[in-house]
Image: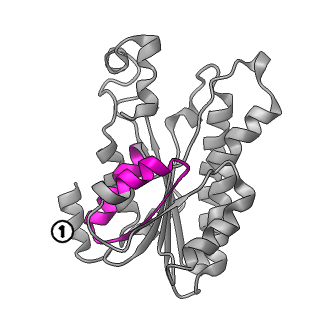
Amino acid sequence: MLIQLNNMTENFFKNRNIIVAGASSGVGRETAIALSKLGANVILVSRNEKKLDAVLLTDLVKGEHSKFVFDFEKTENISDLLNQIMSLYDSIDGLVYSAGTSKRVRFKNLTTDVLDSVMRVNFYSFVELIRGIVSKKRKDNELRIVGVSSLASSENAKFFLPYAASKNALESSVRILSNELKGQNVFISGIKPAYIDTPFIASNNDIYGDFNKYLTEGYQPYGLIPTHVISEAICFLLGPNAKYYSGSCVKIPAGVCC
């Protein structure tokens, strides 16, 4: 699909400045690499500086890329982050929000502190990044945003209340803000994948043995989704047809009945 994107978009992404939140691993890393291949200037943001350096120095195709170390649980500091970014770039053309956290918590152990911690990373900081970028953009400039949600937002898996609630909130913000900001050339969409083949998901092997085998025999028949499949979808949603998908969360279910 990346080849198709190249053919379809021609030089669409060339020299566009795109923030990738959660860029140090998984979907964020894969998306940053794909965008660099398409000619974008990628602004990497994550709390893990060592991994960010590896992406910046080793993985990206040459361009005006940069890195910023930031913990998205510190929502109140997002304005400072954006000021640092805007000191290097005259405009922001896109945002990919793939930062995320998940905590399995039994209801009897669930506290507002746990809920707040997950909501800050998965939802509050997404909204605050959008607020900050929109406040700094020129009205005639187009801004394309993709938030990474999860099929978990529609499921009833035990112990995932904080995560599912936060992803539901993200999806609601996609729908509502796409309508609220449509007169400002802001196009917002989301993707809603099933289980992805990431280091985070690999931790399930400790519980289920071969987690991919466990999935293919039941819940997710086509198995773990490769990260490049998700990054290709994100690049498509950031592309020239972004406005036609604004307000939607595109499902990538890998055979999950939903």
Q: Is residue 27 magenta?
A: yes
**Residue 132 in the image, given as x and y percentages of width and height:** 66, 71
Whether residue 252 is situated above or below residue 233 in the rendered picture: above
Q: Amino acid at mark 1?
A: Asn
Res. 103 in view = yes
**14 displayed left or right of 178:** left
Magenta span: helix, strand or loop, mainly?
Answer: helix
Query: Which residue is tagged 1?
Result: 7
Q: Would you say residue 31 sits in the magenta stretch?
A: yes
Neighbour class for label 1 at 10 Å: few (<14), some, many (≥20)? few
Image: magenta residue range: 26-55
Residue 226 falls in which quadrant of the image? top left
Q: Secondary structure at mark 1?
A: helix
Residue 151 percent coordinates (x, y): 50, 36
**For the point 45% across and 20% down, which residue is it?**
204
Q: Is 38 displayed left or right of 21 in the figure?
A: left
